[in-house]
Amino acid sequence: MAMNQQNSDNFLHQTGAAKRSVAQKVGAFTRSSLGKSLGLVLLGAGVATAGTQLLAPSRPVTQATQVSTTVAPATTTTPAIVSQLPPIAATNPNFVTNVVKQVGPAVVRIDASRTVRNRSARNDDPFFRDFWGQSPMEPQQERTERGLGSGFIASSDGRIITNSHVVDGADTVEVTLKDGRKLQGRVLGSDPVTDVAVVKVDATDLPTVTLSNSDQIQPGEWAIAIGNPLGLDNTVTVGIISATGRSSGDAGIPDKRVDFIQTDAAINPGNSGGPLMNERGEVIGMNTAIRADAQGIGFAIPINTIQRIADQLASKGKAEHAYLGVQMTTLSPQIKQEVNSNSNIGFNINEEQGVLVMRVVDGSPADRAGLRAGDVVRRVNGQEVTTADQLQKLVGESKVGDTLQVELSREGRNQTIAVRTGDYPAELSQPN
């Protein structure tokens, strides 16, 4: 979680996906072991910001400071989140008011804080700074950083869903209900790969939300957001679903494994973790990011993804993600030409369609199975793949330990390689 001493939110500036030549992309990988300009199956560097992420593609990526969160695993397996309230009739001309009345009590404010220790500059002798990195006599100082976000109650016994970046690194988490009650919360689990977290408060008979099926939503449907933007509690905004299935690259958040919902409902810093609902008051997603270079472009994590991850966090304290360990890009005639005309790349290709493997991470499941840079993936488990996003989604939907039959073309010859997925390395989920 990134928290600001003066403000209720920090902004995470992330560079949007830019169209660059393959030579530039490969060059970037010589400078970084985890380049983000191409589609990755190994995505997952942690997000760190309290409130809504502000994505500024024209500015460099900055990662806010994080400290580790002590996860308290649940002592018993928590049942899946289920819808508990009847749908609201969308034919009512005041359907937004009805949604707010029914769902508003289940939307909470989350205030998180942590203590940060650093050293004051007492000795300016350059010898000490150069040799030690700091003066050996500098005393420790403490300061408290605070952050603000939103959340929604998923179970009447106090299980709350919010964004990982709202509570990551928090020493204390305070949950404020709409009726004014303040409850201390503890983080059951936090998953930076999908930006989902579960917080538990000790309470009973709490109001809860109703969950929808996010696979069924379509562009043009109503979208209603409730949250605490900039500390303005219980703010309601309305718009539509602008698009579905936005990849992390499309959304400008390349370190996430999520196909986002895009909405034009107004979302601002502090909305992070709050629900995005349909016209019946059912939660279809969780607001998590906005684009700084545009108006009316916000992103929410689909509720089906949230439910799957939240169940793992509540029962095991962590979420597992299948991992191959390849850097890849969608093949096209232009990519083919650029690859074959660049002698520094080290391989040539004959195909013009498929998913081109640009790099295989040493020691990864893909490396152990024998995948190579220059391979062109055509099918996985018999399912055709033509884009890097499709391949990433197939891997993301598999389980750790599953064996994937990867059909590929290598130097013009077809072959099939069995790859057993691994668990996503924890170090890849941490900020750079």
Image (cartoon, rainbow, N blue to C red):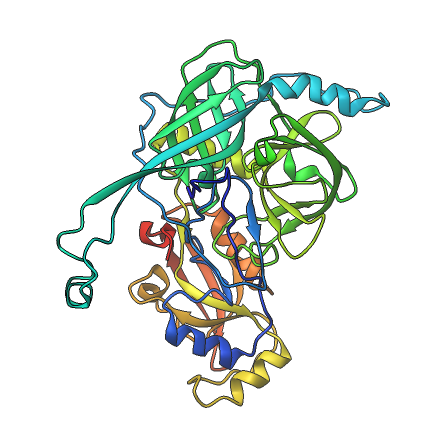
Residue 233, percent from left and from top: 60, 26
Residue 268 picture quarter? top right
Residue 11, percent from left and from top: 52, 48
Residue 260, percent from left and from top: 61, 47
- Left or right of 254, for residue 402: left
User: Could you say which is closer to the camera, residue 285 or residue 8?
Assistant: 8
Q: Is residue 331 above or below residue 366?
A: below
Residue 416, percent from left and from top: 45, 67
Rendered-image quadrant of the N terminus: top left
User: Outermost residue toward the left?
Assistant: 136
Q: What residue lies at 46% left-to-right and 14% top-to-bottom?
A: 157
Number of dots carrying numbers: 0
Residue 143 picture quarter? top left
User: Could you say which is closer to the camera, residue 167 or residue 386?
Assistant: 167
User: Outermost residue toward the top?
Assistant: 205
Q: Is residue 60 above or below residue 155?
A: below
Rendered-image quadrant of the C terminus: bottom left
Residue 96 picture quarter? top right
User: Could you say which is closer to the camera, residue 210 or residue 230?
Assistant: 230
- Left or right of 318, for residue 109: right
- Left or right of 422, for residue 219: right
Q: Is residue 223 visible?
A: no
User: Could you say which is closer to the camera, residue 293 or residue 354?
Assistant: 293
Q: Is residue 316 visible?
A: yes
Q: Is residue 320 above or below residue 353?
A: above
Q: What residue lies at 35% left-to-right and 69% top-to-bottom?
A: 370
